[in-house]
Amino acid sequence: MDLRNNLFTYATSELSQDAFLCWMLSFAMPESKGDHALRSCAEQLLRIAIPELVGTSVCVDEISRQTDSIDVLITVNGRYKLIIEDKTYTSEHSNQLSRYLQHIEEKFPQFTVCGVYYKTGFQSDYTTVRDAGYTIIDRKKMISIMKPFSAQITNHIWQDYYEFLATFEAEAEQFRTLPIHKWEWRQINAFYDNLKQTGFLEELGVSGNYGYVSNPTGGFDGMWFGQWERFSILDVSCELYLQLQFVEGQLHICLKLSADKDALTEKRLTGRMLRDRVVYGKAGEYLFEKHGFLRPARFGNGRTMTLGEYRSTPAFANDACTAIHDATAAYFRILQETKFGGNTQCCLR
């Protein structure tokens, strides 16, 4: 993204985004400057946030930032309190959304309290947000709100923000056409998001999420999915699942084993003991190669271990989808063997 003269190339924090939202919504205040298009854009955002405003006039009475830990609090039409929880690359935590709603309802009982979860980065799962009753306005939604006004509004701050979001989205969508070895974090996360949001995983009979995985070697953007049915190895509860990650421009599809940490400690077992029960046959042969997985160059010995890497080098997104489809079919075959004994005897004590 080469927007070197764009304000938001440098103003990347959530506080900067808070400031933009407050600034734009201030154009819906009675004493605002006479920019009709900017006011209309602000009103449209508020009508998305508070559907009861559709078909009515909109007036912002008060705007406050960082009040009671709330990013932005807007008073609208003398009867609504709108909470805006603003996120770029982080997500909600600690039941904060429900707590904010409850606090404002108790503090302003005469107002109708509404919440908006404003997210411009990537987020895999919005279940908690929806359960809290917040309206989600993500990057795509904000672009759709701003786009009809892009030819009318000449203000440089507004145009910089719109261009920043639109360029971000355009670069993310390049995952559809760029070869995988040219993907950066935006294309990788957009690919994961597409797998999740289009129902691709559900069609394979699995569910999962994606996000950043921190580790001592620098971390990576990964996606993990599976059937998530637990089974027992040596009386330790375990799960098998698949994990996607990109290493040096190549997609790696890893078969992972996760074991209950407390049970390992209690029974004085190591991850290696569980792993060997799963990956080796009676003659010491590696069992998963017949399913298309290669033995890792190095096995781990923790509670979460890579058992195999699927033999595939997709060049484009469509090829990656085919590889994921085939790897998932192999995963189910392995899962069937693992859950019910098979050659691995993993259910034996």
Image: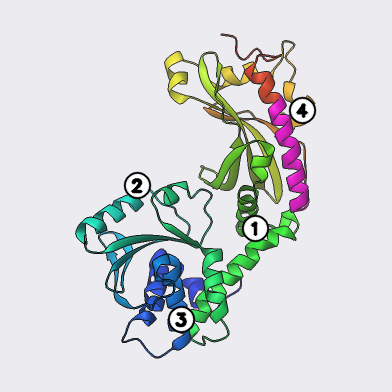
Between discs 1 and 3, the one toward the N terminus: 3
Q: Which mark is residue 40?
A: 3
Q: Is residue 219 visible?
A: no
Does residue 14 lie above or below 188 as drawn? below
Residue furthest front in the image: 55
Q: Which residue is mark 2?
A: 95
Q: Secondary structure at mark 2?
A: loop
Q: CA distance from mark 3 to mark 4?
A: 58 Å
Between discs 4 and 2, the one toward the N terminus: 2
Q: Amino acid at mark 3?
A: Ser
Q: Secondary structure at mark 1?
A: helix
Query: Which one is in front in this view, the residue at disc 4 or the one at disc 2?
Result: 2
Q: Quadrant of residue 288?
A: top right
Q: Position of residue 135 (x, y in %)?
A: 44, 59
- Mark 2: few/some/many CA within 10 Å (<14, 14-19, 20+): few
Q: Are dots 1 and 3 in contact, CB under 8 Å?
A: no
Q: Quadrant of residue 50?
A: bottom left
Q: Quadrant of the N terminus?
A: bottom right
Between discs 3 and 2, the one toward the N terminus: 3
Q: Are dots 2 and 1 in contact, CB under 8 Å?
A: no
Between discs 4 and 1, the one toward the N terminus: 1
Q: Is residue 301 left or right of residue 29?
A: right
Q: CA distance from mark 4 to mark 2?
A: 42 Å
Q: Which residue is mark 4?
A: 291
Query: Which one is in front in this view, the residue at disc 1 or the one at disc 3?
Result: 3
Does residue 37 lie above or below 63 as drawn? below
The answer to which of 318 and 84 lies nearer the viewer is 84
Q: Secondary structure at mark 3?
A: helix
Q: Position of residue 274 (x, y in %)?
A: 58, 19
Q: Are dots 4 and 1 in contact, CB under 8 Å?
A: no
